[in-house]
Amino acid sequence: MAVNGMRAIVKVSDRVGSRIDTNHVSFEFHAVDLDRPFISETAYRSHYDSLRAGRSVDQVAAAILAEFQKGKPKPKMIESEYRDRRAAEPVPAWVAELGPPPRRVPTIPAVPEGFALVDVVLLVHRAFIARKWAKDAQVKITAGQVAAP
């Protein structure tokens, strides 16, 4: 579902703990887009709620997600540790059918053999060289070519 631009996979269960509870429902919210703020910095949040008569499960889940977005703490960026871990997890195929593809790029990109990931601090007037090299490397990575040593 999407609420105010925040997309989440929602899992719902009437099992609370190890028994069936007819008065309470368990909701699990999982982030779809890992590069956007979410209701938890871990890309996951659970919530227990009582039944709400006259409302569908979708309506209740959307209301809960909206409440989390307004409440404290405010939505935060997903921490890199959790973003990298969640980026490796498969997303159900039906999620892609609901709109734009999920954005699940890890914070630390995979670096093909023959390339090295570096962080540099350069004088402004010299940074153009590093940007040019980065653009050239990205073209080669995209094309699947590795520069000869």
Image (cartoon, rainbow, N blue to C red):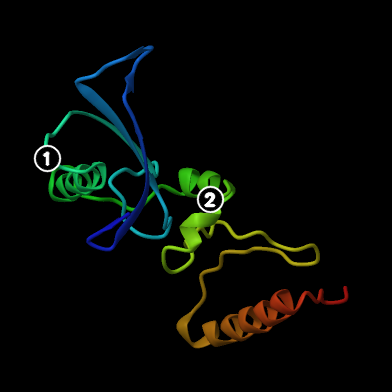
Q: Quadrant of the C terminus?
A: bottom right
Occupied quadrant, residue 113: bottom right
Look at 62% across and 78% down and name the residue there: 134
Residue in front for this viewpoint, 102 or 11:
11
Residue type pointed to by label 1 = Gly
Mark 2: secondary structure? loop
Whether residue 69 is visible to the viewer of this picture, yes or no, is yes
Q: Which mark is residue 54?
A: 1
Residue 18: percent from the left, percent from the top?
38, 12
Q: Earlier in the sequence, mark 1 or mark 2?
A: 1
Look at 54% across and 44% down and name the residue there: 85
Assess whether mark 2 and mark 1 are in contact (beta carbons under 8 angstroms): no
Q: Which residue is disc 2 drawn over?
A: 92
Look at 68% across and 82% down and name the residue there: 139
Q: Quadrant of the N terminus?
A: bottom left
Pair 1/2: label in front: 1
Residue 11: percent from the left, percent from the top?
38, 38
Tell whether 11 sits left or right of 21. Answer: right
Residue type pointed to by label 2 = Pro
Residue 136: percent from the left, percent from the top?
68, 84
Tell whether 141 sits left or right of 43. Answer: right
Tell whether 7 sits left or right of 148. Answer: left
Occupied quadrant, residue 109: bottom right
Is residue 86 positioned above or below 35 on the image?
Answer: above
Look at 20% across and 47% down and name the residue there: 59
Mark 1: secondary structure? loop
